[in-house]
Amino acid sequence: MEIRPILSALMRSKVALVLIGLQIALTLAIVCNSLFIISQRVQMMGRESGINEADTFTIGSLGFGAAFDIKTSIQEDVALLRSLPGVADATPTNTTPMSNGGWSTGINLTREQKTSTAPSAMYFVDEHGLNAFGAKLAEGRFFTADEITFRERSSVDWPPVIVITRALANKLFPDQSALGKQVYLDTEGNPNTIIGVVERMQVPWIGWSAEDGPDAEFYSTFVPQNVAFGNFGRYLVRTEPGRRDEVMKAAEAAMLKSNHSRIVREPRTIERIRAEGYQGHRAMTIILIGVIVSLLAVTALGIVGMASFWVTQRTKQIGTRRALGATRGSILRYFMTENFVITSLGLALGVLLTYGLNYWLMANYAAQRLPLVYLAGGIVVLMLLGQAAVFGPATRASRVPPAVATRSV
Amino acid sequence: MLKMKHLSKVYRTHLIETHALRDFSIHVREGEFVAVTGPSGSGKTTFLNIAGLLEEFSGGEFWVDGVDVRGMNDDQRSRLRNEKIGFIFQGFNLIPDLNLFDNVDVPLRYRGFSAADRKRRIEENLGRVGLASRMKHYPAELSGGQQQRVAIARALAGSPRLLLADEPTGNLDSLMARGVLELLEEINRQGTTIIMVTHDPELAARAHRNVHVIDGQVTDFDAEPQLRVPSGNATAAVA
Amino acid sequence: MFYYYLQLGLHSLKRNPLLTALMVFGIALGIGTSMTSLTVFYLMGSDPIPWKSDKLHVVQMDNWSVEQPYRTPNEPPDQVTYLDANALMQAGKADLQTAMFKLVWPLQPDNQDIKPFSSLGRATYTDFFAMFEPPFKYGGPWDRAQDKDHGRVVVLSSATNEKLFGGQDSSGKKVRLNEIDYTVVGVLDKWQPRVKFYDLTNGAFNDSEEYFVPFTTAIELQTQASGNNSCWDNPKPGWDGYLASECVWIQFWVQLNSTARKDEYLSFLNNYVGEQKKLGRFPRALNNRLPDVNEWIVDQGVVPSDAKIQVGLSFAFLIVCLVNTIGLLLAKFMRKSSEIGLRRALGATRGQLFSQHLIEAGVIGISGGLIGLFLTWLGLMAVRSLYKDLNSVAHMDWFMVLTAIALSVTAAVLAGLFPTWKACQITPATQLKTQ
C-alpha cells in the first residue's frame, strides 16, 4: 500500500483531515505537557524527607494564661512521652518537615557580609532530636544534654553550636567539610560552630525558595534550644515500629491527665502531615490524569466516529475496489494506512503545538523544557490509539461485499 | 472462457427463500461478445455478480478460464478477479477522490505490477479510450460518456481475458452510448471476451449472441455460437 | 416552524443514537472539565466584597533592610510593625482604619461538659466591623472607648455562640479566653467570605475567626501573633523590645471613601515615612502603597498557578471536544445529503435548511450542556475532596450555571455552523442525479 494515492484522496476532503489532524495535534500537546507536569509532581512527592515517617507523630500543648510555666511543662511532657511503653524516643520541636509552618533565618559566613549566603529552616530540638526524627548523622556529632538551653522572648543570641544538613553544608562550604566551621546566624551575635552534619532533613515548606534550586528544600539547621514563649509546646514522638497508632492514643491520654491547666492538641502522624502538605500536588496530578484519560477517550471516539462515517460514505467505493480485485486485507490496510497518514500529519502539527504550550508554561509558570522522551512517548501512544480506534471501522469496511459495486444505489 | 453448469443461487432470510438463479447453465467461449438480456428481477445482475466472482453461488459448477471456482476463498477469488476479469458498471463507479490516472491505477496496485509497468499500462489504456490528455482530472470534471471511457480503461488496464459490463450505457444519452458501444466492439475485436448485461434489445442485437434470462433460468440458449467473421486483421479464437 | 425543526432534529438524533451520544458526551465532558476549573478559578479571583472593594485598602510601608527588598523585585512588606500600626491608629487619618493580627487562645467554657479547646481569634479595632461588614445576629461591635481602655469584650462568631450558648443571645454573658473573662457584646451571623481577603498573609482559604477581641487588649496581654512574623533586624530583648522592633506582623487596613481621600492618605503616609527617616528608620527609598481589595488579591497570588494551568488545559480540552463535535456533525449532515437535496428539490430554501440543522446542533448543545452541568457538579465535588481548603470556592453559583449553559450552546452552535453551512451547499440537482 503506497501512501501517495491515499494522501491525494485525503487532500480532496481537507476539512475532515484538518479536523482530525487538529484534534490529534491538540491532544498530543496537552498529553505531553500534562504527563511532564505529572512526572515532576510525582518525583517531588516521592522525595524522602530524611526522617522516619512511618513511626512518628507530633503532639502539642497550649497552656492557659500568663502564669503558665512553659519550661516545666516542656520538661515534664517530654519525660512523660519518653516513659510511655512503645515510645522509641521523643523531642520537643518547633515544627516538622512538610508542615508548612516554621522559622527561617539567613546564614552568613562572615560578620561583615550584607546579604546572607543561604536561607535555612530552623529546627529547635534537644539532644534527642536526631534520634527522635530518625534522621541520619553523616559527620561529627549531635547535641549533648548540657548544650540544650531555653529560647525565651528575651533571647537574642544563638547557641554556640549547631548541626546542619549536608545540602546546606555543600552550599555554605562547597568542596570541603563543614565540620568545625563557624557561621553567623546573626551578624551582630556570636559565631555558631557546626558540630555535625545530618544526611538529609527537609524544610517545613514544600516548594520553598525555588530560586535557590531544588536543594534549598533541604537547607535545615538544628538548634539546641527549646522555644519557651507563647505557651505552646510541640513534641515529635517516634514509636517502636508498628505501634504508632496505639502509642498516639496513649500519649494523648497521658498528657491530658498529667496537667489540667492546658489543652492537648490532637496528635498528627507525619504521614498525615505529608498528605496534607502535598495535597495540592496530589490534586493536580489526579486532575491531570483525569484530563489525559478523558482526552484520549474523546479523541479515540472521534476517530471511531469519523472513520465509521467514511466507511459508510465510501461503501460503494470499497465495493468497487473489491470488484477490481482488492482482498479484504488490502481494504483493511487501506483504512489503517489512511489513519496512519492522518495521525502523522496531526502529530507533525502537534509537535509544534506541544513545544508552543511548553514555551507558554515556561514563560508564565516557571516550567522546565519538555524532555524529548515525553514527546516520543506521546507520539507512540497517539499512533497506537489511532490505529486501535480505526481498527473497528476498517474491519467493517473489509467486510463490505464486492457485489455492492453492481447495486444501483 | 466461462462455463456454468446447473448453477443455482438462493437468497435466504429467516422467513423466505428466494431462488435468484436455478439450474442455470451457460458456456461462453473465448472471443465471444454475449449479451444477457431479460426483464427487471429476472436474475441478470445475480448472474453477473456470480460471473464476476462478486458473489458466491449455492450449487452447481462454475469454471472461469478453465479454473474451477468452487471452494475458493475470498482472497483467491479476489486475485482471480483481479487477473482475469475486468468490470464496467452502469454507474461507472469511479472513485471521486482520485484523478483519472489513480483511478485506472487501482486494479494494477492490487495486481502488484512495477511502477513503470503500471504507468505504461495506464497511459496506454487512457490513450486507447481517448483521454490521455486528461490524466490529472477528477471524475467530476468529466461528462458521463467520458467517465465510462475511464471505467473501460480501468477495466482493460490489467489485460483481462473477460470483460463484464453491467448496462454500460444505461446512464448515457444515445450519442454517448453509441461511442461506448463502438469502443466495446473494438475491444472485442482485439480478443477480449465480453459479457454484457442489458435490457436494451437494440444494444443486445449488436452482440454475437443473446442469452435471455427469465425467472433465474436461461430460456434461449444458442448452443452453437454464430461467430461473426471479425473484420480487420484480429482473429477470434475459438474455445 | 421552530417546532417542526425541533421534531426533525430530535428524529434525526434518534436515528443515529450512537453518534448522537458521542457528540453529546463529547460536549458534556468538555463543558464539565472547563466549567469545573473555571468555577474554582473565578471564585478564587472574584471580588469578595464588590460593593466597596475599591474603598478598602491595605497599607504597605517599606521599612525593610537597605540590603534587600522584602520580596523581589522591590515589594514592600505585606504587614506593618507595631510602631507604625500604633502611629497610624493614633493619627486616625483614614475614614475607618484597623490594625489587626491572628491569635490562638485556649477557650475555657464555663460548661464543664465542654473541654477547653484551642481557638482561632483576631485582635482588631472596632472599625473592622464597619469596614468588612460581617452581619450581626445579636448585639453589635464594641465601641471606640473599649479600644482605648483595652476593654475585656468579645464578639463571637455564630458557630462559637452555637457551641457555647446553644445559639441563644449571649450578649452580656462571659467567655473565658486564656484565663481571662471577656463580656460578649455581639454575635455574628454566618460569615465566611469566599476568600479571606483581610488576611491573605495567613492563608486565603483559611477558616474564619471564632471570636474578635480589641487589639489594645491583646497587646496589653502580650499576645504573640500566631500568624506570619518577619524580621530583617534582631529585636531587642523582651516584649517591649519586640514592639519597638522592625518586625512586621500586623495587617493594617483603611477605608477611604473617595479617590481624593486616597490621595490625601497616601501623602499623609509619605510624610509620616519622611519623618521616620529623620529618626533613622525606613532605610529604603520611599515605597508606600495602598492597594485595594482586588489589587491585593492579585498581588498576593491568591489564584495559584496550578489553577491557571488547569483552566488553560481544560479550555484546550474543550476545543478538542468541539473539534470532535464539528467532525461528527459534519459526518452526520453529509450522510444526510440525499435528504437535504430532496428537501431542496421540494422547495426548502437554504435559510430554512440552515435553521433546521442549526436547531439540531443546538439540541445537542443544550443536552451536552445539561449533562456538562452535572459533570461540573461532580467535578466540584471531586475538587472539594482533593483540596480540603477549597470548600468555600468549589461551589456552583447561578452565574456559573448560566455561563455553563451559554458556553455549551454557543460551543455547539459554533461547532454546528460549519457543518450546517456545508450541508446547505448541497445542490438539489447533483444529489438527485448521482446516486
Image (cartoon, coloured by chain):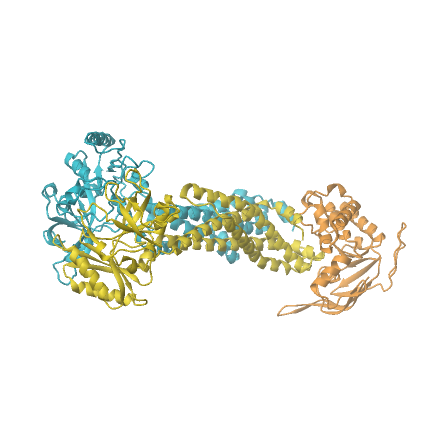
Q: How many marks?
A: 0
Residue B48 in view, yes or no: no
- In the image: residue A405, left or right of residue C362: right
State the residue in front, C227 or C397: C227
Residue sitting at x 13%, y 47%? C221
As drawn, the residue found furthest toward the front would be A180
Percent of width and height locating residue A385: 54, 55
State the residue in front, A174 or A367: A174
**Chain letter for the part of the structure drawn in yellow:** A
- In the image: residue B56, left or right of residue C24: right
**Chain letter for the part of the structure drawn in cyan:** C
- In the image: residue C298, left or right of residue B125: left
- In the image: residue B51, left or right of residue A105: right
Percent of width and height locating residue B58: 71, 69
Percent of width and height locating residue B171: 71, 50
Residue A123 in view, yes or no: yes
State the residue in front, C335 or C291: C291
Q: Please identify which colour was used for chain B in the image.
A: orange
Percent of width and height locating residue C316: 46, 47
Q: Is residue A281 above or below residue C272?
A: below
